[in-house]
Image: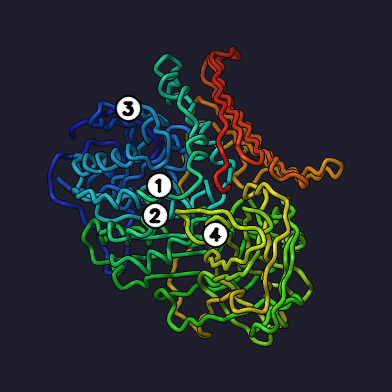
Amino acid sequence: MAGLIIRRLIALPAIALCLLPLSGRSGHGSGPKDEASPPSYDFRIEDGWLKMRDGVRLAATYYTPVPRSPGERFPVLFEFLPYRKDDGGYVGIYSLYTYFVRRGYILARVDIRGTGSSEGTFPLREYSEQELDDAVETIDQLSRLPGSNGNVGMWGISWGGFNAIQVAMRRPPALKAILAAMATDDLYHDDIHYIDGAFHVDEWAFWFDHSKAIPRSPDYPIDERYYRERFESTPGLLTYLKQQGDGEFWSRNSLRNQYAKIRVPCYLIGGLLDGYRDSIPRMLEKMTVPIKAEVGPWNHAWPDDGTPGPNYEWRREAVRWWDQWLKGRETGVRSDPRLVIYLRAGQAPDAGLTMTPGRWLAGDWPIPGTTWKKLFPAADGRLRENPGRTGRDDLFYVPSFGIGTGLWWGEPTGDMRPDDAGSLVYDSDVLRERFAIVGLPRVRLQVKAGAPLAHWIARLEDVFPDSRVALVAGGLLNGAHRRSRLHPEPQVPGEADDLEFELHLTTWTFEPGHRVRLSVSNSLFPMIWPTPDLMTTTVVTGVEATRIELPVIPAGPLGAPAFRPAEKREVRTDARDLGSDVWPQGTNEWKRDAARGLVTYTWSGKSRYEIRDRRFEATEKNVYETNESNPASSRFLGEDSDRIELRGRTIDVLTSVEIRSDAGSFHVLFVRRILENGRLLRERTWQETIPRAFQ
């Protein structure tokens, strides 16, 4: 095909190698209806180039089935990521791609320009026009690969799911279906830069800016081209700090509010402990294309190995999906339930949870028969079924509360009582009957702020008979967005405001003997950057305008799917892990300096692995700090390092960042260094002051 240059052939054990024929009929999987194509193909692995219109070459790795008959053709599954397919992503690609290539699919993994092995400069943002244009052009080229039947599916988790959704909005002719896992339709509100509309910084954002400065694999050249295209590239952190409000920057390529742009079938996978789960019910409600959606109890991971379990073999479901839309086989996916979701039984708080009690539900969305249970906070700390008498509860803002909730709206949490100590808390009577919820609980609060900017955090919780408290769901409203995300405005101290916002998608079963709790606070540290002013806020109780609404589903069975147990993934024999932390694992440390009023949270992690004769070691440390008597003076410190050991050569890429705030601005110091064999080759510093804009 045009623009394709084969670079090298990787020979691995037990992999048959042959050339694809140039023409012939389409390949179709065998097997009865409802069955996926069986694993009946040997395959080969090749690396190559895709040349874009401007001359930049993107590096691709192809997993290609060996035809079983002359002229057999296969669909192409395309994944487009910046996560360095030839080192950082090397092992993971193999463990996933072998499943699909053995079932008659060509797999193409392509490094986004300016990352990994690809040429060019990475644009100043994720999901840029350049990235999406490159993806559309790549899909056209992949559809014309030797051996392709012309049909392409785009897929991926996280970044790969995000850009699959956004590329589908552009309607490239050869793209016939997508699979998007752990991805969202709302780039401002739901992505990690401004969680719920409030500034967030974490290990991923900092690490990604660091990773862009690693030289091109697999040879890691350090020359003037490298300095120009990678080392000198502006940190994306600065780009995002200059986009603190919603608007065209975010909405242009967000699917939300323009759902009609997608006209291909969508397979959506989410996790109840993943920050991007809310897009799934919205897409089910708003889109008219075929949708297959599954939401399990896991964090930001694939369903076969996500934590906490239970897990299932999603790859079989994906093959049924691709067989239907890319091979033209009738596999029964048209009659599958539109939504399968895991109803949690209501487990005790456990930050180390590995298996979630509960059961699968299958049906449509919204779940038929759902009713909304209203509960009203009262001045005596009760959560009542009727508003009662009007009252008011005052809360002094302490910026350091929130550590128990986690680094985003995900991962298992422990006992929430430490966070509730900095909140207004309202408990229901002891429950006499069991009820279950599935959906996005709604919170309405009549409030008065004590400063121009306040964050309003609500947590729905389950109080166990022994007083332990489990997090069920949570959400935040940036007070400046109470009337409009597009037109933020300060709150007027002492003036009443009616707030309305949703908590994140959840499922839960409340048992007899337990209590329902609503917890309201103004701080969510370190997940959200503290607002600058000390204040006392007020929640007006005993009124219709202050309540929580719970989506209660009917009692009884809702049909469970016939998921198959997760299969063991294939493992590469030419790479090995030497001891790594998988986020959010690592070292966590929390300290309070009472004399200075400083509260500090530190996370650190590392990874060590080996690919053939190359050895890699990476470390990261993130420190969050806030001042309880002066929250305007908060700080983030990050340090990141990557060491690459080659024959006779060692490369170190080092990055540090400091973000400090005062009442009016963020002050950023970003330093990047590269060393070879211990000798500093170049250092680059960016230093900017960026005004705070309702953050």
What is the crowding at mark 1: few (fewer than 14 residues within 10 Å), some, or many (at least 20)?
many
Label 4 to label 1, Cα distance in Å? Answer: 18 Å
Q: Secondary structure at mark 3?
A: strand
Which amino acid, mark 1?
Gly
Please name the residue that numbered disc 1 is placed on. Answer: 160
Is 168 left or right of 588, judged from the image as shown? Answer: left
Q: Which is in the foreground here, disc 4 or disc 3?
A: 4
Q: Residue at x 44, y 34 (%)?
A: 84
Q: Which numbered disc flags the more N-terminal residue, 4 or 1?
A: 1
* Nearer the observer, 402 or 18: 402
Label 3 to label 2, Cα distance in Å? Answer: 30 Å
Is 531 left or right of 336, judged from the image as shown? Answer: right
Q: Which numbered disc flags the more N-terminal residue, 4 or 3?
A: 3
Does residue 566 appear in this view?
A: no
Q: Which is in the foreground here, disc 4 or disc 1?
A: 1
* Nearer the observer, 81 or 659: 659
Q: Which is in the foreground here, disc 3 or disc 2?
A: 2
Residue placed farthest to the right in the image?
595
Please name the residue that numbered disc 4 is placed on. Answer: 298
The reply to whether dot 4 and dot 3 touch (C-beta < 8 Å) is no
User: In the figure, residue 196 lies in which quadrant?
Assistant: bottom right
Q: Secondary structure at mark 4?
A: loop
Q: Secondary structure at mark 1?
A: helix
Which amino acid, mark 4?
Trp
* Nearer the observer, 218 or 104: 218
Q: What is the number of the mark on residue 180?
A: 2
